[in-house]
Amino acid sequence: MDPNQQPSTDAFQVGQRVHFAGQPRRVGTVKYVGPVEGYSGIWVGVDWDADGEGKHDGSHNGVSHFNARGPKTASFARPHNLSSGVSLLEALEARYRTTSTKEEEDEMYVLSARNQKVSIELVGKDKIQDKLSRYEELTSGSLSYLGVSLPGSPEHVSSALPNLKELDLTGNLLARWEDVGIICEGLPALEALNLSNNALSPDITLVPQLSGIRVLVLNHTGVIWKQVEVLKDSLPHLEELHLMGNNIREITPVSATSVQGFNSLRLLNLENNCLATWDEIIKLSQLPSLEQLLLNNNDLSRLWYPDSATPREGSDNAYETLEKSFKPFNSLRGLILGGNNIEDLESVDSLNSFPNLTDIRLSENPVADLGEGGVPRFVFIARLAKVEIFNGSEVSPRERKDSEIRYVRLVMSKSHGSPEEINRLHPRFTELKKIHGIEDERPSIGSSGPQKMSSGLISISLKCVGASMGEKPTLVKKLPATTTVGKLKNLCESFFKLKSVKPLLFLQEEGSPLPTLLEDDMASLIELGVGNGSTILVDEFS
């Protein structure tokens, strides 16, 4: 539709996607077409996508015309103030053939050293504009938030864009899968398609042919796994699938206990959904090529490796009989679990059972929140034998060695149960003791050889960072590993000649974005995992 043409009331139907005229980012769904008491003519009631875009909940003067998503998401508009959208090629014209006016070009200048205006040439602007105007040379195009609602003729699209490989249609007015299929039919070279923030219909009556698509982005589209299963056979070469923010609560395979097909899928993004049980995630364990699984900001509280020989409490028996011909999550290398509700170390330990898992994120989970009884970074590294990237930071060989030694010392200082109980709570403890040659007995005078129980001296660096402390050189001190935090605070007052300053101590760990506050004065350095080479920051109460 020509954006300058005045739409009639017939142009709008309930359920139709529209945007406010001249504001293509203000998108909503038509919920009502008809009269409004007290006003003449016909009005269109729109429920806007963004919170706060409207004025009411679909009611006016006590009369409810429709139910909106929220109390301030709806408004009534005259038809001429709304747009039902344009075709893909019309949006293409608007995005790539728009030329600047003489007045706009006159305003683009810089001042020379002699204070004279020098016109800006925008990095070969004319050549770029000429290339973009010849659509057949385009390989990547962005038509985000341009009000695209119609595909147009496949033949016209194909002749105009024969080489387009990537297309971004974020935030448009597309709703029918049939239209998505027509667009793909007209773009034979298309490999990556972004349909985020289009309210796509849950009913797929005519399955689109998407055989060339390798990357499909469906964030904030309302698409749930039921629709994914319908689309599966039309996406034989799909390598990346993004489904963020779609309120997905369950994974629903069509005819098996686990998802089948998607043989080329390497990355699956399910962030910002409502997945609450690991049983749902296990349904993805048979995807043969899956390397990256993104699960940030869901509601997961426990996880485990699906071993049929080890039933899990609360798990569905159906998922304990997974196919033995394929090891579950066999190709998985990255598991991103930030912002969930994981709080037990047993879940952390289970990650060792994933055959090839090396990249793990557990930030913003209770188990990693020191203020909620979580554990520091070095404990995770020690417990996770294969992790190479943790919470986005690389684990160096030195950090791994230091973390494992600190962890063993910590366990030895705090554990007083039977060896069986210690090994149950700390599955890698015995292994790590052997790797690093750490023995149980306390060191005797003149002892040498393997490292002894950490009641000996450890070397730590003390660095003043308090604003009123002045510049003081970093001190390296050897202290008993049993030194308490309270004792170390007193020593720092003496070492740095601090007067009228009450010190705060922080442990600075390699790979951690923020230092850890040492707030328990009765805890010993060994109990807090402070080891040889650790750095303690000396700050002050503000």
Image (cartoon, rainbow, N blue to C red):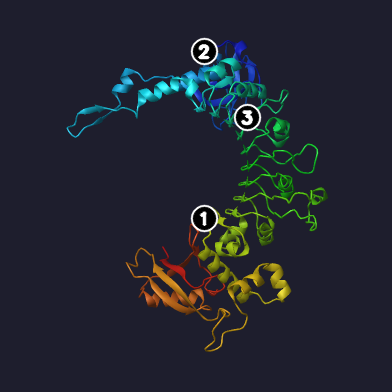
**Location of the C terminus (image quadrant):** bottom left
Q: CA distance from mark 2 to mark 1?
A: 51 Å
Task: Name the residue rendered at 79%, 43% in the picture.
Answer: 257
Residue placed most toward the observer, 191 or 105: 191
Q: Is residue 306 above or below residue 243?
A: below
Image marks 3 and 2: residues in contact by CB distance under 8 Å: no
- State which quadrant residue 264 falls in: top right
Ranked by sequence position, the earlier of labels 1 and 3 is: 3
User: Is 311 on the left or on the right of 368, as rendered?
Assistant: right
Residue 321 position, x and y percent, is 81, 50
In this picture, is 295 found above or below 151?
below
Residue 85 at least partly seen: no
Q: Amino acid at mark 2?
A: Asp
* Residue 27 in view here: yes
Q: Residues within 10 Å of mark 3 (few under 14, many from 20)?
A: many
Farthest-out residue, bottom: 445
